[in-house]
Image (spheres, grey):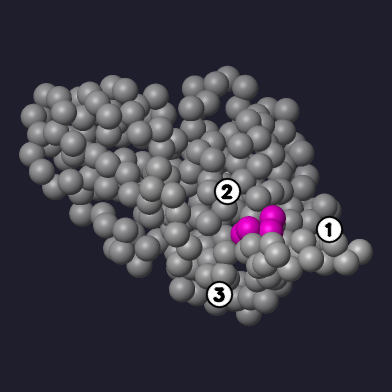
Amino acid sequence: MFDLLKVRINHGDQAIKDIRKAKINDSFRGLPVIKNTECFSDCVKCSEICFSDAIRKNNEKITIDLGKCVLCGDCARVCPYKKISFSTFYKIASTDRKKLYIDPDTTPEKFYEDSVKINYEIKKVFGKSLKLRSVSAGGCNACELELNACSNVNFDMTRFGIEVVASPRHADGIVITGPVTKNMAKALEDTYNSIPAPKIVIVAGACSISSGIFRDSSELDRKFFEKIKVDLYVPGCPAHPLSIINGILDFISGK
């Protein structure tokens, strides 16, 4: 017993103390940065190599859809003009799907200022306690693992009153991961309908936001998003715990 207590004391507090200002490894790929520099209009190497179809080029102007981007970094590697790079900025969630389009005028500061708008009605109801039901709608388990990591000793999402619960009857909202396959479409809708109102909808990862690299698959059924409004988009492949937690906190508590 005393040995266990000594080990616990020696370990100290392993949780990230300030989740809002957490430092992240330099190898992490976060918000893309597009330089406002010239490149040949006939060069389309970046869009050609993008297998998630996230890059559009109109003459010299490049736009990246963060809702489709899997943050692979291939576009930055092949660009002969070094026009595209990836920052370590992880606060990339948004309450507006249109805000996920990145262009040369987008900076981390500007993106963060405009991306997540606090919902004061949601804050009033769920500001101090938010229970979420996770639905893996045909995902590869990467985003699911990161969502699980949100509650581990390092990120400790529960200290903010945010928890993933086992039953939709106990939930205030739903977190959807995966592109939504035909086999999961009915289960997803049933889970959503089982959550008492009012409720929120969060989509985490490129697959859930846009169907990602599975966009052309005949096995998808995304009619759910034609009927239900999404409250918060968290990009990534997979979505990082810091992106998920900061996005939820900004949405229910403000920046």
**Residue 127 picture location, percent across and down:** 63, 75
Label 1 with label 3: CB-CB less than 8 Å? no
Of residues 232 and 74, the one nearer the viewer is: 74
The amino acid on which the numbered mark 1 sits, given as a three-letter code, is Arg
The mark nearer the N terminus, 1 or 3, is 1
* Residue found at the far right of this picture: 1
The amino acid on which the numbered mark 3 sits, given as a three-letter code, is Ser
Q: Residue at x 45, y 54 (%)?
A: 24
Q: Secondary structure at mark 3?
A: helix
Residue 154 is covered by the magenta coloring:
yes
Q: Secondary structure at mark 1?
A: helix
Q: Which residue is mark 3?
A: 253
| Image position of 187 (left or right of 82) | right
How many residues crowd mark 1 within 10 Å: few (<14), some (14–19), many (20+)? some
**Separation of marks 2 and 1 at Cα, in angstroms:** 19 Å
Q: Which residue is mark 1?
A: 169
| Image position of 184 (left or right of 1) | left
Q: Is residue 221 above or below residue 189?
A: above
| Image position of 57 (left or right of 247) | left
The mark closer to the camera, 2 or 3, is: 3
**Residue 59 picture location, percent across and down:** 12, 34
Q: Residue at x 65, y 50 (%)?
A: 149
Q: Residue at x 60, y 27 (%)?
A: 220
User: In the image, which disc is placed on residue 92?
Assistant: none
Of residues 194 and 236, the one nearer the viewer is: 236
Q: Which residue is mark 2?
A: 203
**Separation of marks 1 and 3 at Cα, in angstroms:** 24 Å
In magenta, the rendered stretch is 152-157
Label 2 with label 1: CB-CB less than 8 Å? no
How many residues crowd mark 2 within 10 Å: few (<14), some (14–19), many (20+)? many
